[in-house]
Amino acid sequence: MRRTIFTAEHEEFRALARTFVEKECLPNIDAWEANGIVDREVWRKAGSVGLLGVQVPEEYGGAGISDPRYNMVINEELSGHGVSGLALTLHNELILPYLLSLANDEQKKRWLPGFCSGDLVTAIAMTEPGAGSDLRGMRTTAVRDGDHYVINGAKTFISNGLISDLVLLCCKVEGAQGSSGISIVVVERGTPGFERGRKLDKVGARSQDTAELFFHDARVPVANLLGEEGEGLHYLMRNLAHERLSIAISSVASAFRALDLTKDYVRNRQAFGQTIGGFQNTRFVLADLHAKASMARAYVDNCIAAQLAGDLTIEDAATAKLCATEIEFACVDNGVQLHGGYGWMEEYPIARMYRDVRISRILGGSNEIMKEIIGRSLKLDGPLGAGR
């Protein structure tokens, strides 16, 4: 089915993004996987061709294009080519909205030019050893001391944890009003008392550095506060729907990549005097997966349209994330099965996908949380007809 969510201009931009991925990413994936981190230079190359900060005003080095679909195109090209380490989507889609909507003029002048050039790589630190989906349970604190906050606490599972230059730190400011006092403070590389822990040894997405962060009386200027004290939880919740839609977009692109890899394999692999693709079971498995992935893409595209119109709901984003990530894993899992023993070999891309995509059902809120969000919207806890 022909997609209608993207225009000719978006497809021209897609060609640019695809060229970048093919030239700068694919030849380096094996090295990035071995090192557990991508090269800094690839961020600068992404900035030089216009893949960072598309929505940033031109005066700060961006393209000044408010349309979020350009970032979605980048997301699809990275995921559709199996590039899991270069976290442009985190940078462009998840962190930039905070900077654009909350940063004051001085902060924008200080951070956005480097954001767009690739000289400043970003991360956001929410999760703690004892607080994941329950953000209200975070314990990292910030105490006002003159013109600085004194910050103490620890964060874990932080993407771009080692490579980042700016960390949007979620913490509880002492005495702040609002939802649990949670605030967002930008911590810059080299801040006294800010230490990076070990690079976490993950099952998959190994080239995407994920680390622990520690704050021991770290002194951060009050001028680095984003928005208002105590309003951090509100800001975070406001962006969660887009984050989950972004994950869904990535998962759908990844699902179709798994299908393409598997189709290519079964067309050529011989068994019992014919290609594997000639067996009815193979056709039925891939037909079922293709139908489900196509339905997921249609729903996700509809969610994109809803976001453009300002109508995307929390429930719709949760539905997109839940369905897309489940279908993604089904496509990869069945792809491994149809590859047989070769599906377990590292030299086959489907094997790496099996490791990489499992996290999708946990990122952005686990799929159990998505079901809870959707379930609550069904109003099942009252008498028949209640809430109608």
Image (cartoon, grey):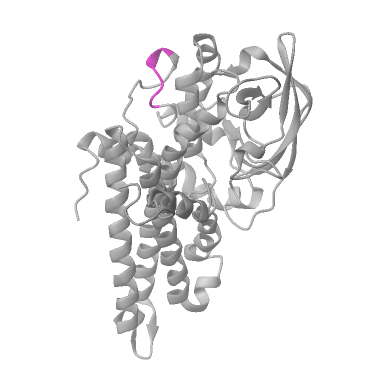
* 301 sits left or right of 228 in the view: left
Q: Give the quarter of the image for residue 307.
A: top left
Q: Is residue 27 above or below residue 185?
A: below
Instruction: Write the residue at 49% across / 10% down.
Output: 105
Most extreme residue toward the bottom is 272
Q: Position of residue 59 (x, y in %)?
A: 41, 12
Q: Position of residue 121 (x, y in %)?
A: 57, 30
Q: In this view of the protein, which residue sits in the foreground, 144 or 3?
A: 144
| Residue 2 in view in this figure | yes
Q: In this view of the protein, which residue sits in the foreground, 191 or 207?
A: 191
Q: Position of residue 179 (x, y in %)?
A: 58, 28
Instruction: Write the residue at 44% across / 29% down.
Output: 52
* 156 sits left or right of 218 in the view: left
Q: In this view of the protein, which residue sits in the foreground, 97 or 136?
A: 136
* 312 sits left or right of 193 in the view: left
Quadrant of the rendering where the N terminus is positioned? bottom left
Residue 55 belongs to magenta span: yes
Part of the protein shown in magenta: 54-59
Instruction: Write the residue at 39% across / 78% down.
Output: 269
Q: Give the quarter of the image for residue 215.
A: top right
Q: Is residue 338 above or below residue 218?
A: below
| Residue 195 in view in this figure | no
What is the number of callouts on the image?
0
